[in-house]
Image (cartoon, rainbow, N blue to C red):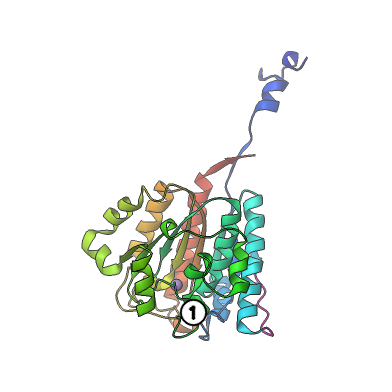
Amino acid sequence: MLENVENSSGTSLLDCVMMKVVINMKVRTIGVPLQEGCEIEGSRFACKALQMKGVFFDEMVDVNRDLDTRSLVADVCSQIKELSLDAHDHGEFPLVIGGDHALAIGSIASTMQVQMLKVLWVDAHTDINTPEASITKRIHGMPVATVMGEGYPELVELMEEERLGVEDIAMLGIRSMDPFEEQMVKDANICMYTYDQIEEQGLVNVLEDLDEMMDLPVHVSLDLDAMSPSVCKGVNTPVEGGFDFEDIMFLLEYVFDEYDVVSMDVVEYNPLHDQDGKTADMIVEIVDYVKERLMEKKREI
Ligand SMILES: [Mn+2]
């Protein structure tokens, strides 16, 4: 009888069998040296520059530059999806670091295969262009529309049967929209706060307003251009105004405290625009912070 077998501490074998093993959540860092989604030189060196600052990548996506742009982005996003799914399978937290914002298609496609999701999009741009409407035709301006089902077929199909609903995303820090995007956000009634609105209402009040909406696991997609170019220069498409670094750290602290954050992107790092290395230093701090917060999070195996 199992009940009768006791060890020296008085714990029976049955207790041991029933006991759940609790371990710390681990972050899996996935590096994505992608720049083809924005067609600006620099982000292909993002991961190398961050490695020199001591950022460790558990995985590195291979960018096949022999492919045409659409196939290349689809191939990169497909690799991100696989790596990120594998992280979820192992109970790990995928932290995707790049690289232009097209990569978010892969990370959201992955996390949505695992669970229903809300997305917090922190960015100067809404990135909700479609291939038809986009002025620049750059894919890094299309990830939100793509995960909602409007985009290049080879990218939309990464979502499989899933589509992000218009009611499942909140955008924070917006300062630049094409007329089409403005109309789209308005027509679909997407939850969006411009940076000016946040400044007026206060960041904490805006975040509190989102509490009710963020009632499912949350994917945070942090575009570094959400920050003001006066503090964060190392991005592809800077827009005047925006958060300072303390705001971003406050925001992260809030979302990790209040929401069930299950995956995250940090995107648009361009080391060629980061002459003083300060943007890289901020990314190092963000990665360290996420790792630290995940250490507090336990999971049962
Ligand atoms: Mn973006």
For the C terminus, the quadrant is: top right
The percent position of residue 246, horizontal first and vertical second, equals: 34, 63
Q: Is residue 107 visible?
A: yes
Asked which quadrant contains residue 56, the reply is bottom right
For the N terminus, the quadrant is: top right
Tell me the residue at 71%/21% (across/down).
Answer: 14
The percent position of residue 71, horizontal first and vertical second, equals: 65, 79
Residue lying farthest to the left in this orientation: 200
- Is most of the magenta stretch helix, strand or loop? loop
Asked which quadrant contains residue 190, the reply is bottom left
Residue that label 1 marks? 270
The percent position of residue 263, horizontal first and vertical second, equals: 53, 56
Tell me the residue at 32%/74% (across/down).
Answer: 175
Q: Which amino acid does label 1 sit on?
A: Asn
Residue 133 in the image: above or below residue 21: below
Asked which quadrant contains residue 228, the reply is bottom left
Residue 132 in the image: above or below residue 54: below
Q: Is residue 124 visible?
A: no
Residue 255 shown in magenta: no
Magenta residues span: 61-67
Q: Nearer the viewer, residue 298 or 212?
A: 212
Relative to residue 176, is residue 282 drawn left or right? right
Q: Could you say whether the residue bearing mark 1 is in a helix, strand or loop?
A: loop
Tell me the residue at 42%/64% (across/down).
Answer: 121
Q: Nearer the viewer, residue 57 or 126?
A: 126
Residue 64 shown in magenta: yes
Numbered label tally: 1
Q: Which of 188 and 60 is in front in this view?
A: 188
The percent position of residue 26, horizontal first and vertical second, equals: 59, 51
Tell me the residue at 65%/68% (across/down).
Answer: 78
**Label 1 crowd bin: few (<14), some (14–19), many (20+), radius 10 Å:** many
